[in-house]
Amino acid sequence: MVLLGVSAVRWLAAVCGLLLHAQLCFSVDPIVIVHGGAGTVGSDRVPGKLRGVTLAARVGYQVLASNGSVLDAVVQAVRVMEADSYFNAGYGSVLNIDGNVEMDACIMDGSNRATGALSGLQDLLHPIGLARSIMEHSGHNFLIGDGLRAFATERGFSFLEPPGQLVTQYAQDALDRWKESDRTERLGEGGTVGAVAMDLYGNLAVATSTGGTTGKRVGRVGDTPIVGSGSFADNRMGGVSATGDGDIIMKVCLAYDVLRTAQLTGSPVQLVADALLDDMSSALRGTAGLVGLDVAGNPIVAHNSVHMSWAYQRGDTIAYGADKNDFNVVPASDEQQVRPHF
């Protein structure tokens, strides 16, 4: 048994008090926000996308409510959309010029900037799970090619057999239309899926997953797996998951630029996101969108595309939308079908 003197006891009490005070000061309402990709979506596809993003937000939030980590929350939210053919990720990914699915993904931990990213992945339903394994077990940030596949096998991931099971008829039809066009424009919905979460103590995580763009060259890499372009998280700045024209987003390091500019100028992240998207569009004619959270847990939704499906849950409330003027709020317990209101 160790006996402490009066001064030591007072010092210990003071430290405990400071720690408790800090925890209380940084306590926020947990929140999970997701997006289902920026682009132009046919009216027949909007309801499915809204159902998908609201389900993803619910699932991610339930993970946090059950004492899961923010990493668990964003992974589970993204997995919902990777398994949904309404989204360009996992099952539902668009096809490259050879008619194959090649996927990119990234995850980032805002508490320490730990990162896991991959590109060119085939025949694995949930790339985001492998990205997390890269972050936690590879000793590196980014894997591709044969090394990526070998690592996945080493970690126990199972690839689909026979290959090609991620190809959907919708994606095949989009590729056929693209090949019949002059190929100067990107046809189909495009987009990406992503999630950002914050827990009770202000810890952040971001996860982003995509199939890329219809008709892309074999081996093309977009913004999604590139830290600072399609994904970025830092507890001191916020978290952002981007979507849209990845070849343009890469040129402006959109996710990092939004958060860093807001930090340096003291401006609200929402205003900075809107302004930088406008600047990108004016300078480079890029179409993009993003969702995010600032350090206080305020949700950020911004896009210069016609549509971007998104949703977030905080407490007992879910908000969702699809176009720039679409903002709907429902109780999380409401089991009615989510519908577009525009």
Image (tube, rainbow, N blue to C red):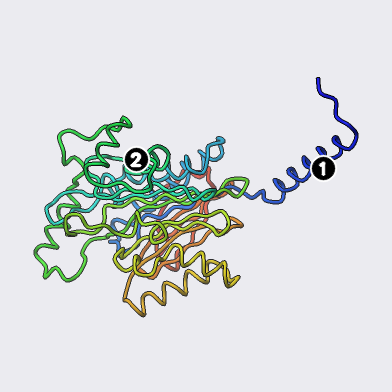
**Label placed on residue 340:** none
Q: Sequence-wise, which precedes: disc 2 or disc 1? A: 1
Pick whichever, 47 or 314, lies toward us: 314
Q: Residue at x 38, y 48 (%)?
A: 141
Q: Residue at x 34, y 65 (%)?
A: 250
Pick whichever, 81 or 51, lies toward us: 81
**Label placed on residue 14:** 1
Q: Quadrant where the N terminus lies?
A: top right
Name the amino acid, label 1: Ala
Where's residue 163, x and y in %? 16, 38
Q: Quadrant where the C terminus lies?
A: bottom left
Helix, strand or loop status at disc 1: helix
Is 333 displayed left or right of 28 in the figure? left
Is 263 displayed left or right of 33 in the figure? right
Q: Is residue 60 visible?
A: yes
Name the amino acid, label 2: Leu
Q: Residue at x 48, y 67 (%)?
A: 258
Measure how far apart labels 2 and 1 are at the Cα level: 43 Å
Where's residue 97, x and y in %? 13, 57
Please name which of the two marks, 2 or 1, marks the residue nearer to the observer.
1
Is 286 displayed left or right of 336 in the figure? left
Within-10-Å neighbours for mark 2: few <14, some 14–19, many 20+: many
* Pointer 2 residue: 130
Compared with residue 213, is residue 82 higher up or lower down, i.e. above or below?
above
Within-10-Å neighbours for mark 1: few <14, some 14–19, many 20+: few
